[in-house]
Amino acid sequence: MRVNFTVNGRPQEADDVWEGESLLYVLRERMGLPGSKNACEQGECGSCTVRLDGVPVCSCLVAAGQVEGREVTTVEGLADYAKHRQSAHPGGGCASGACGTSLQDAQQWTAKGQDGQTGEGTELSPIQQAFIDAGAVQCGFCTPGLLVAADELLERNDQPSDADIREALSGNLCRCTGYEKILDAVRLAAARQGEAV
Amino acid sequence: MAGTTTGIPANVTQGSKTKGGVGESMLRPDGTLKVTGEFAYSSDMWHEEMLWGQALRSTVAHAEIVSIDTSEALAMSGVYAVLTADDLPAAKNYGMEYQDTPVLAYGKVRHHGEPIALVAADHPETARRAAAKIKIEYRELPVITDEASATAPDAVLVHENRGDHHAGHVPHPNIVHRQPIIRGDAAEAAKKADVIVKGEYTFGMQDQAFLGPESGLAVPAEDGGVDLYVATQWLHSDLKQIAPCLGLPEEKVRMTMAGVGGAFGGREDISMQILASVLALRTGKPVKMVYNRYESFFGHVHRHPAKLYYEHGATRDGKLTHMKCKIVLDGGAYMSSTPSVVGNASSLSVGPYVIDDVEIEAIGLYTNNPPCGAMRGFGAVQACFAYEAQMDKVAAELGMDPVEFRQKNAMEQGTIMPTGQPVDSPAPVAELLRRVKARPMPPERQWESSEGADVRALPGGLSNTTHGEGVVRGVGYAVGIKNVGFSEGFDDYSTAKIRIEVINGEAVATVHTAAAEVGQGGVTIHAQIARTELGVQQVTIAPADTQVGSAGSTSAGRQTYMTGGAIKNSCEIVREKVLEIGRRKFGSYHPAWASAELLLEGGKVVTDGGEALASLVDVLEDEAVEVEEEFRHRPTQAFDLRTGQGNGHVQYAFAAHRAVVEVDTELGLVKVIELACAQDVGKAVNPLSVIGQIQGGTTQGLGVAVMEEIIVDPKTAKVKNPSFTDYLLPTILDTPTIPVDYLELADPHAPYGVRGIGEAPTLSSTPAVLAAIRAATGLELNKTPVRPEHLTGT
Ligand code: FES
Ligand code: FES
């Protein structure tokens, strides 16, 4: 079958997709976007987390056909996505809870780079920078999924408590770090976000 | 001055320190790629026209293979090849220490999940469906699953014709290796004991559960060889095992490290390397292979499950008199690194304590359980679990504080190990315990507030059904000792190629090694060492491959010591050569060139007094200096096969933990509130990653304590939980804060004084949590992991 959807702001078309193929497979193997990771393909580890119309989902559990006409954001598009959020709601975060990213917003937004894979000239989003600065990346295999989930948390709640962070990231396994530095990274991104206001 | 060889360089008069050297907290050079999703892990490899490889694995643990019918699979459209052992081009077995592991099973299968056949197809789903169409007829054999069934006089032999060098000295062919250690006279010393405490402990089978699945890409080359891109811990060891199985000379198997998504010992053995290569050579097309999580549980060796029997004696005043123990490690169906794990378990079985009279025996079994091999802590973890439980029991028997009791018996620099080896560098065991004990306690009953209970902070979290009525707190301590590096006379070395040259007007160093970056942060410290030694700011880390000499394995906490040492060594020679060039060009202009101790710092040649003589750019101009050198640590010896005596280890590492837990005794649920660690790291080359390693290791120990175990059916030897649904890993909700306190007591024998870091915290974290749960509940709890039914008695 053929599937049409938007990835990181660019319309995409996938041909000859098997009915059983997951969104994760289509992203990684057909679109050349391997940023979303394949650690369990069972919905248990969160490494494959992407946003589907703004909502974080395990892309390994989403059938490719289900994304027809919809909007997907992967780690490759995270920096642009964050920038777009910033211009839509300058400085404010989304503490009111009223925003998130509506489908309409998502559709208006188009990634700038021509190639989501090289990331050429892409600035990092605050959460990406915070993961590097806090030492929250070791092998990094869990990182893309954690970044997408953490970014969504900070969009909903710009000053999360530790309990909020733990709850929001409880679907993402990391085998290397012991999570402490991941918490540090989210706290750091939140603090920087606060300073920017 | 650049571009000229005459005249004193006028623009340099003062040296400045190079930034980003040894001892500074540095960010990972691969961090940006990893957070943007661009970092290419082994499962991200892609090639035009590539096929997908898939293995078919045995559904039974022990059986003769009567027949294999591949015809239906071959007939499927999109299928390019279906192979069995009969199609293998050359050697049929591989193995790290001994080649007893079949690439594809032939004649017999010896464990559940052993690969039997291979498929290459144009879509992974086609490959899976084709594999499912292969028909295998088995004649099942009785399974060997424990010590009793393995060593029975009439036991079925897992390997009928053993040819390995351990075979001659083991008491039974189903015992892979046996290492006794006898020192002093334990029976005589036992007479002095006022209390004698015995215990029996069971350590479950843990999985490394690295997140990046076994995967890679094999590309057939025009010269008949193969280019292989995989995630591994040791390229050169893989190469030695792969080439004979492909019937190719080593130079025709070119290996390049692909991004590694964690390892923890689980990538020390071969997984898909040979399988994908065989398919690529057969089909003439690139073949990608990615294990799914189910297959991953069968595709690598696990941590040895163990039974441990201990006896300790002590006098009334709290001095240990003697220790006797027997440690039985289940190695599963193939050898892997079981002999070395046995050597570690026996030589470290006393723990970081002074006991002169010991009687130790460790054995490794061949069974039909899943093969076991390397995992973080390597044999020392199981022993630590048992001896630390014993320490608490003895202390309780004597009515002593468990930490004071440990401190009273703690080893220190100069202590003689049970193997007769003196500990000749700092061993701050008592101090590490003091540090974790002195730390303020986390507040009690944090879930309580004026509005009621915050259930998120209770054992069980949101899925809880109480408000904390049955919750009790416990505190537990543990400390452990781990050897660093490869032991028992292994010729352990690492190689580094260093190049320095001027690029775009700046002196740049390139570090080329075959060392595996598995997430531990080697790439960061390699650059730090080159900066420190060569005084340059810009350092390029070349991709790890087999075009440079072996770096040895990224395991046993050895890589900073060994490859760090090789980089340091090579840089020192590079420095000498650079100074020679400098003397040749500028020596006549300043007497310091001949007389002073010269350093490279801040891109300049400086005297030890800080005076700058020339910039590296002027010295080098268009010359490049390149050096490839090896580094070896001081030699070690094999342990004597009867007495276990011998200077077998290179270095020791020490860590201590204090665990604070809250247990809901009604629900049987445990919440670890805090897991504090103190560790001696010798020298923190990169403090940021030191802490990350300690926290990560601590969490793996926590996992074993309360949830992680591969469950093997004792009747059928089949794995019951090969998935992340059923094999539980600590999530961010299960993991407490992990405050880390590290000491830097330099090891005088190691480069920069470094001490292996990654493994020690995995040892003591498990027994500390167990001790805390025992303190909270008063239960005996002699098995990992502790499950709710153990706490509620249901
Ligand atoms: S890969 Fe999707 S949740 Fe693990
Ligand atoms: S899994 Fe390796 S950094 Fe998280």
Image (cartoon, coloured by chain):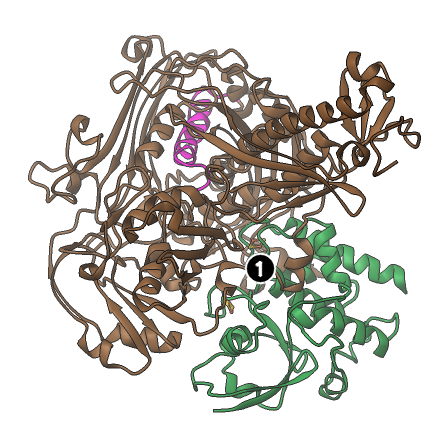
Chain colours: A green, B brown
- Residue B594's x, y, as percent? 78, 14
- Residue B568's x, y, as percent? 62, 29
- Residue B472's x, y, as percent? 55, 45
Residue at x 52%, y 53% (from the top left corner):
B260
Residue at x 45%, y 51% (from the top left corner):
B255
> Depth check: B577 or B665 in front?
B577
> Please, what is the dominant secondary structure of the magenta stretch?
helix
Q: Which chain is home to disc 1?
A: A
Pick out the residue farthest to the left: B154
Indicate yes or no: mark 1 CB to ligand 2 under 8 Å: yes
Q: Is A160 left or right of B719, judged from the image as shown?
A: right
Magenta highlight range: B375-400
Q: Badge 1: how crowded within 10 Å, few (<14), some, or many (20+)?
A: many
Residue at x 42%, y 71% (from the top left corner):
B50
> Depth check: B451 or A106 in front?
A106
Q: Is B590 left or right of A125, judged from the image as shown?
A: right
Determine the image quadrant of residue B613.
Answer: top right
Residue that badge 1 annotates: A142
Q: Is residue B344 visible?
A: yes
- In the figure, B696 relative to B172: above or below? below
- Amino acid at circle 1: Cys
- In the figure, B351 relative to B150: above or below? above
Residue at x 74%, y 61% (from the top left corner):
A127
> Depth check: B676 or B561 in front?
B561
Q: Is A153 left or right of B794, judged from the image as shown?
A: right
- In the figure, B368 relative to B576: above or below? below
Determine the image quadrant of residue B722.
Answer: bottom left
Callout 1 secondary element: loop
Quadrant in which the N terminus of chain B is drawn? top right
